[in-house]
Amino acid sequence: MARRLGLPFVDSDHVIEQRLGCSIREFFAREGEDSFRDVEQLVLDELTQNPQGVIATGGGAVLREANRRHLHGRGQVVYLRSTPEDVFRRVRHDNARPLLQVNNPLERLRSLYEARDPLYRETAHFVIETGRPSVATLVNMIVMQLELAGHWPPKAAKPEGTPPAAQA
């Protein structure tokens, strides 16, 4: 998405891991989810202060009301909606996801989806049903939604020294 739009890309989880000096999984195991969510909230607040690109968040970012408010109020949020089964198919071999290190990860994904889907919808300006299209198709769908809503391309700023428009 960022490459297509010619914008910088930031993954909030990578920023968090840089701050922590360890993986999210290690921090989760040592300090717990609440401590992780505190760090996540600080990072998201900083990243959304002056968003200049595409920000990817972790799946639980919407759990805190402050995150939902900052994300929704400071940028255009796209919820890439996937069924728990689709997510499971994509992440079933990923051992870095602390919340999925359980006996039945698919059941956990269903539970997380049930709790989080309303929060994602509350936060999002756009909901894109992912299904199984290619990345290029998803990017095209997002760009089309941004264009239709008038958010892309960005409105050109007036050159310095240009007088304000006359008021009626």
Image (cartoon, rainbow, N blue to C red):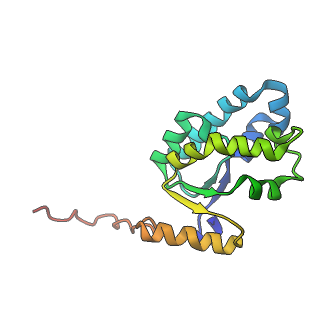
In the image, 161 versus 45, the foreground residue is: 45
Q: Can residue 22 be seen by looking at this rendering?
A: no
Which residue does the image show at 65% across and 74% down from the upper left? 137
**x and y percentages locating residue 67 in the rendered image:** 56, 38
Q: Which residue is drawn at 65% across and 29% down?
A: 38
Residue 89 quadrant: bottom right
Residue at position x 29%, y 64% from top? Answer: 161
The picture places residue 22, in percent across and down from the top left corner, at 83, 37
Q: Decide: is 167 above or below 30.
A: below
Residue 150 lies, with reference to residue 50, above or below; the image says below
Image side of residue 105 versus residue 143, left or right:
right
Say left or right for 42 vs 68: right
Q: Tell me: 79 left or right of 18.
A: left
92, 1: nearer the viewer: 92
The residue depicted at 69 percent of the width and 56 percent of the height is: 83
Depth check, front residue: 164 or 91: 91
